[in-house]
Image: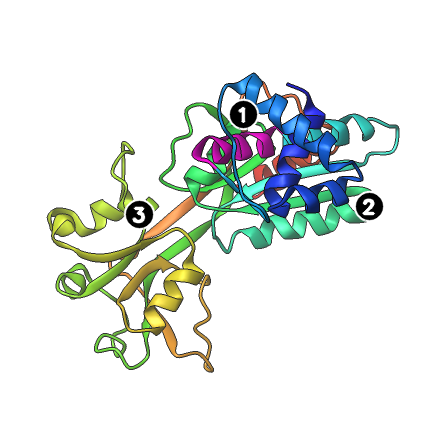
Amino acid sequence: MEFRVLRYFLTVAREGSITGAANFLHVTQPTLSRQLKDLEQELGKKLFIRSSHSIILTDEGMLLRKRAEEIVDMVDKLKEEFSSMKETISGDVYIGSGETDAMKQVARIVKDLQLSYPNIRYHIYSGNEEDVTERLDKGLIDFGILIQPAELTKYNYINIPAKDVWGVVMRKDSPLAFKETIQPADLINVPLICSRQAMQQTFSKNEFADWFGEDFDKLNVVTTYNLAYNAALMVEEGIGYAITLDKLVNTSSDSNLCFIPLEPRLESGLNMVWKKHQVFSTAAERFLKEIQARFSNSL
């Protein structure tokens, strides 16, 4: 399977037609059609359903598209790493992170590094823990920022000197909006919008479940989410109360929403993780040294 043909396949999938892809790639339509047919024969699967004006990916085609995108990303990343191996430190650093206000600390480090190493570029990927660790395990990112509790046994990691505060985002006209804190009993009979990570009980310790205690299974969870922005939209529409971290949702004076912390207070620590025995690019190695120096000194 040639790398060039995978790029052809992805272009066809993106353009939705042989004609559009051929024009984009500057190849003839017969040439492109023959390459795709050879690819289908090599894999022994039909990748497209063709019509007179467009193509639709089959299930096998959708799978190949996902894997091909990962391969192309990996090859592009490898090329960038080799091109950055010069006396002047340059290159790319790939960081995956869940939603957390602690990204401000990482942003400050990036800003400081820019003064000494202006040729380093940074790429931020946002997602929940599952998204971040999947990309980390596949080598598509260099570092991940995980909100505790998280599975850390297969990674090297450093603690980020910050805590995220848990609470409830609700409409300002909600019955609970007058309270200064939210206790477990307040949430038993109300519709809740919860992050999937908070609901997971696969960790040896789930701080969120421990906070609710024996009433955890009684919660009326009507919606789960992995991005707080989407959860806030649900809250605005009156679907429920969102269990989330502070400072992720706009709760300013011009917003219809407010944030009320949990009582007893519930906080989550954070870790920056990377694969064990990871071989970093020059740029990523420089970033890691700065992270270790800055965060180790602040503990």
Which residue position is annotated with label 2? 118
Query: Is the C-beta separation of discs 3 and 2 under 8 Å?
Result: no
Image side of residue 139 versus residue 205, left or right: right
Helix, strand or loop at disc 2? Answer: loop
Residue 283 % position (x, y): 74, 34
Which residue position is annotated with label 1? 275
Query: Is the C-beta separation of discs 1 and 2 under 8 Å?
Result: no
- Crowdedness of circle 2 by 10 Å Cα count: few (<14), some, many (20+)? some
The amino acid at mark 2 is Pro
Which residue position is annotated with label 3? 198
| Magenta residues, start to end | 58-71
The amino acid at mark 3 is Ala
Image side of residue 100 versus residue 35, left or right: left
Query: In terms of depth relative to the viewer, which is nearer, 168 or 14?
Result: 14
Helix, strand or loop at disc 1? Answer: strand
Say whether residue 75 is visible. Answer: yes
Residue 225 % position (x, y): 35, 53
Query: In terms of depth relative to the viewer, which is nearer, 154 or 62?
Result: 62
Q: Which of pointers 3 and 2 lies earlier in the amino acid sequence?
A: 2
The amino acid at mark 1 is Lys
Instruction: Determine whether 44 is above or below 299 in the image.
Output: above
- Crowdedness of circle 3 by 10 Å Cα count: few (<14), some, many (20+)? some
Residue 108 % position (x, y): 66, 52
Q: CA distance from mark 1 to mark 2?
A: 26 Å
- Crowdedness of circle 1 by 10 Å Cα count: few (<14), some, many (20+)? some
